Amino acid sequence: MLDFLRNVLDDFLVYFVDILLRLPAVIIAIAAHGFAGSLVARCFGDRTSKAYGRLSINPIKHIDPIGFLCLLLFRFGWASATPINTKNFRHPKLATFLSALAGPLTNLLLAFLGCFLLVPFAIPSVIEFFNSEPALVWVYGILTSIIERFCLINTTIALFNLIPLPPLAGFRMLSIVIPKHSYKAVMKGEKYFALGFLIVLLIDSYFFGYIGMGMTPFVNFILNDVFAKAVNIIFLPIFS
């Protein structure tokens, strides 16, 4: 019985530490995603996001409390939807496409930046410095874990949002090619699509995990085959 309780406590501590390590990435990813979409919408003439206080990098303006907790605890969740009125747009189709693309693209740029931040931690002299003291080994592990999660979470959020299903950004991007009447018909039922999509996510994450397994190869491709190789090409001549 004591061994069982000890194992449960150990698992809980590992899970709790993982939440703390993911917290900075989740906060930054949500704030940047929401701000980017609001900024592009404002550039095309829509002041709705600004009126709601969403043209801000303040995470509180973009966080949905329940979605934020789900993202931390269950690794899937949602932010507050960016309020946009497409009737205010100049060039509505292009503006809708770019305002939807802005969030995922910003998350990918942040993930790429995170890959750059990992570079100093791979330099032999830096590794030697951190290995010189037990406390520094601990600091090294925390810093690299936070940055690695930062890259992973931003890439995952970006690719997930690019799925072309309502209410995700990927579907809004299709507005540039979908007939106007068809797009409007789907968007009228956006709330119901969102609820259905959430139910599917809950069932899949609890029983199957197919969505996560399906996304993993794409996330790994972006991080390992695109970003990591790009960083190596840039920094290899410097440190070789």
Image (spheres, rainbow, N blue to C red):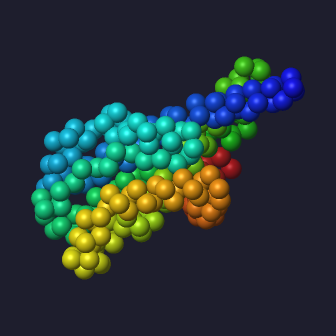
Q: Does residue 69 sit above or below 138 in this rendering?
A: below
If the image is split into quadrants, where does the N terminus sit?
top right
With 112 as the anchor, is 175 left or right in this view?
left
- x 31%, y 45%: residue: 35
- x 19%, y 51%: residue: 42
Looking at the image, which is closer to me, 80 or 149?
A: 80
Expressed as whole percent of the image width and height from the top left, the position of residue 10 reads 76, 28
Instruction: Please identify the quarter of the rendering in which residue 41 is found.
Output: bottom left
Using the rendered image of the protein, determine whether residue 37 is visible from the camera's viewpoint: yes
Using the rendered image of the protein, determine whether residue 151 is visible from the camera's viewpoint: no
Looking at the image, which is closer to me, 16 or 25?
A: 16
- x 57%, y 44%: residue: 74
Q: Does residue 238 sit above or below 179 in this rendering?
A: above
Expressed as whole percent of the image width and height from the top left, the position of residue 58 reads 32, 34
Instruction: Please identify the quarter of the rendering in which residue 18 is found.
Output: top right
Looking at the image, which is closer to me, 110 or 186?
A: 186
Q: Does residue 157 sit above or below 117 in this rendering?
A: below
Expressed as whole percent of the image width and height from the top left, the position of residue 60 reads 34, 33
- x 30%, y 64%: residue: 189
Please give the count of numbered marks on the rendered protein: 0
Expressed as whole percent of the image width and height from the top left, the position of residue 46 reads 15, 54
